[in-house]
Image (cartoon, helix red, strand yellow):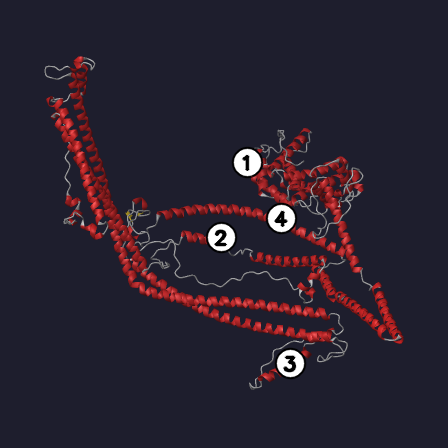
Amino acid sequence: MNLLLCPTSSLHRQDRIAEQPEVLQELVVAEEKEDSIGEPPPESFFFGRDPRSITPRFSKKMMRLLLRYRKRQIYEIRRIFDWDKLERQKPDPNRNHPDDDAQIEEAMRNLGDYKLKIGADYEPKSTETLTYKYIEIVECRERHFELVDSFNQQVIAMRDRKKVLIESIHKKRERLDVIHKYLPAKDRLHVEPIHEVDMDSEYPELNLIEHFQPGCGVNIDDILHLERTVEEVMASLKSEKFSLTSSSQSLADKNTTDLKESIMFASLQISTVGQTLSNTELSEELQQLPPPSDAAYFERNEAGDSPMMLELRHRWLREMLLEQAFICGEINEEVRLFDKELEKLHVKRFHVKMEAEFMASFLISLNQELYILRDSEEIETQLLQNAKIAMNTRNELQQVINDTNRQLDELRKSIDKLGEQIAALQLTFMSTVKGHKFFDFLRRIFKKKWRPPKRIRGDDESSSSSSESSSSSEDEEADTKSLDSLDMTTIRLDETTCPSGLERPLYELAFAMRADRHELEREVLDLQRDVDMKRKQISEMQINMKYHEEVYQREKNALLDFRRQRQHEINKVKLSAILRMDQLQHFYEGDDYRDLSKAILFDADMLIDLRRRADKLNEETLATRRWHRINIVHLRRMNTDIKFMKYEITRLEEEIRQAMMKKFGLIVNLDELEEEVLRRYVFELETTAEDELRALELELLERQRELCRCEEELIQETQNNTEKLNILTVLREEKNILGIILDTQERNYAKWTKPQVLNLSYDIEKLMGIEKSLLQQIECLEREICALRLKSKPLQINNETDSSQEPQVTSELLPNDDALVCPAILNVDAYMLPPMPDDFIMDRVHTIVQKSFNRFFGRSTTPENVRKFSHRASLYLCQAAYSFQGRYTDRIAECITEHLQTIVPKKYFIHISADELRKLFSEVVAVFDYERSDVNTEELISGIFDHAKDSLCAHVHLGDADVVNRTHFIVTHMFKELIEVLPLEEFLSDETLRIIVDILEREPMVDPRAISVEKLITSTLKHAKENLLDGITAVPVRKLGSNIQRDLIKRRQYKPSSCESPMSVRIASKKSSGSGLPF
């Protein structure tokens, strides 16, 4: 729309806005708690000691065990956290998806809420202030000035152009007057007269020029304004003098040209010519003249004219005529172009004047709005200040609540940590005194509860002493009350004295650990008291929060009401708008027009954007529906995967239980087992005295060396300073000492030669388990080596090997070429383990094997045995086909037959030949090829229909009289093959129904009325029972058969019933491309 208005102005009583800004700053909301991963449980097998002081003494094997234990603990905690987080992220069926809510908010923010300014729910803009309106008025004035000034500049430019044009015309008229002097009067062309310039109307600013100047010729304005110095002004005067000199020189040149023309006019005697000749006459006269090569061309006649002078005279006159015509045409063209531009300027002057008038009217409206805002500014400022104060008070209180909640979380974490410390302290005490004969006595000491002292309601002076005595008495009462109910001993020991037989350090340790526990419990009580106090503070602050929110809402509503009243006053201001007829819609009602003053002015571009957005929303709706269909397919696949994973979980759990029973003889917890191993190892590591014994031995050796040295000194001194008796005495003493030393050495030697008997049964059992696992690993490696040599797919090994263990050198059993020895890759047990194909392949292979076994030896055994043997054989054959990928040789066939005999009894193999077994394995391989091929369901059903027609033709050629209802025969044959090929979900799908109906509709000999649904169910169930297809019931067959008959009856036009009369059978030709499956 074309409006000469400010785009942010309000229209008459009604207007729309795109979006509403925030009235105040955002509110502070309650903080959301972040999820944090919990810590692993305390490692109780370190007995409360620092693990960093014990782990450096661990062996490599025990260190790997500890790292594996910690890694599994962290993994389990992380898995529990992820699962809880996933459960919390589970979508709520009663709420929208967060992405959908975000898109809705984006749409509301982009499209806007277009509310009328006169509406009761309209929220005025917070930017509608006095300053904002004054700036808007100044901008409007600026636009008004720019509009008028731009037009005035164009007028001035046109005036300057007119001045230049008039000067140019004057110069050309002077030249034209000179040419007229030389031309005859009849050949002269005159220019239309031009009006003189009205200086008062075209140059009104000249009336404001001062005509008084200083005597030096310098303009006084240049000196006063100091735009140029005096020297610059004098230099400009000199340049003007130079320009006057150059103009005089050009005038002299012009006079020279006039002199030449006057000489030519006189010499050629132009004045004698009365009128110039026309082009034809001039051409004839020039042809009569002699050529310039003739002497007569230069001879004069009696009148004094020569042919040369005649030719020069006419040529000179012709040049004058051409110059005259050129000057006249140029003047007329310049005047025409100037008049055309002037007309355009007149039209623009009309539009500019109209737009300026409307802008002045709009400026008056803005001034009226400014007066309204000026009168209401003080009240609005006070209301806004009140709302801000209420909001700041509410935000500060909310911030205090958030800080208190964080402090409350910290207190809870501290309580949890203290609880863990208390539990670790109890575990340490129990592990220390476990198995002690005074276990009950020490436990009673440690478990004695701590109770805070009771308040004495007497005088305040004796409160402290009485509290101490009460606490001691309470401790004594607690000793009696906190006894374990199971400690029913006949002797009650006193805790104040250490009983005989109990180690004093252990007795003191029980009291020290009880004191530590009491200290931790006191801290827990203090923290719990702080938690209760914080909760009470939060509840009180929430009550205050509700009050402050009500105050803030009341102040905010008062501000909005005042702004709505101010907006109501502003809406009374009249505005004018210019609209074209093509911009108006819905303005004609009945026989009369509506009142346009009550119309709503809406931006056309915004309306176009809304329509485009509607088209875009339709496209997004279609895309969402497509995505919904994709999600449905994905959900079905996920359900299939979940079903398979549940089956795998059950199977793996069963294998784990079997492995535990096989290895340990019972179901054990690996975490508890590893904890027990580490606990025993740490206990042995901490209780061993090897380091102390080694230090004592070193000290004993040092003392012995010192003793030997002293004895040598004594002997030397004795020999030198005593008599023989003394020497004899000394020798006897030395002998006695040496005897004692020898006895000591013999005892030490006997002690070291007969070490303490150790219990190695546990180590032997563990080594036997390691040996068994290594043998299994060797077997798996041999199987993998054999698979790599045969270039088949890798098989799943029984157990995963520990990557941290050193590789063991084992012997390799290579497969030889002897037909009697089968490689380990064809062993039956190797194929009873994953990887397993998907459910579709397994079901198809199981159907083929079960059908073949039922055909081979179904009459020789019961259906239950056939199902059991076919299930095991299908697993084996499926894994073999999956590994060999279709490379089937005689040796592989012999090995497969040999290992199948371990699954199926040998007495049944007399019914199966080698070719039939090869054919069975080829069909199993074909299932994998079909899974890898690109054949779809439509091609499969088309192939089945072709097989049905071939079977019908074969019966007709053989003269089978039983085939009377040929439509029913084809449908029955198709159903028999479909239940063998397709899974039950795909058999009942709408796509399968559509494909079957399309194929039968294209066949002219098919009559849907000839289909008997009950006979179809009977024959299909009979076929399923014969081929041991247990999953087929009457419900899906009846549903599909009824739907096929119903859709065919709707689609086709019926012909006369031909099911009872003979019908010509068209021999169906087989398609060149097979369906990918042998039928």
Q: CA distance from mark 2 to mark 3?
A: 64 Å
Cα gap from disc 2 to disc 4, whole angstroms = 28 Å
How many residues crowd mark 4 within 10 Å: few (<14), some (14–19), many (20+)? some
Element carrying mark 4: helix
Give the answer, above or below, for where 278 lies relative to 257.
above
State the image coordinates of residue 973 (x, y, percent, origin top left).
65, 37
- Whether residue 899 is situated above or below residue 688 in the rendered picture: above
Which residue position holds label 2?
100
Does the CB distance between marks 2 and 4 fall below 8 Å?
no
N-term-proximal mark, 2 vs 4 = 2
The image position of residue 825, as x and y in percent, is 74, 43
Nearer to us: label 1 or label 4: 4
Of the image marks 4 and 3, the number of the one nearer the N terminus: 3
Above or below 234: residue 296 = above
Q: Residues within 10 Å of mark 3 (few under 14, many from 20)?
A: some
- The alpha-carbon separation of the residues under discs 1 and 4 comes to 38 Å
Query: Could you tell me residue 669's position as x and y percent?
Result: 71, 59
Q: CA distance from mark 2 to mark 1?
A: 46 Å
- Can residue 545 be seen? yes
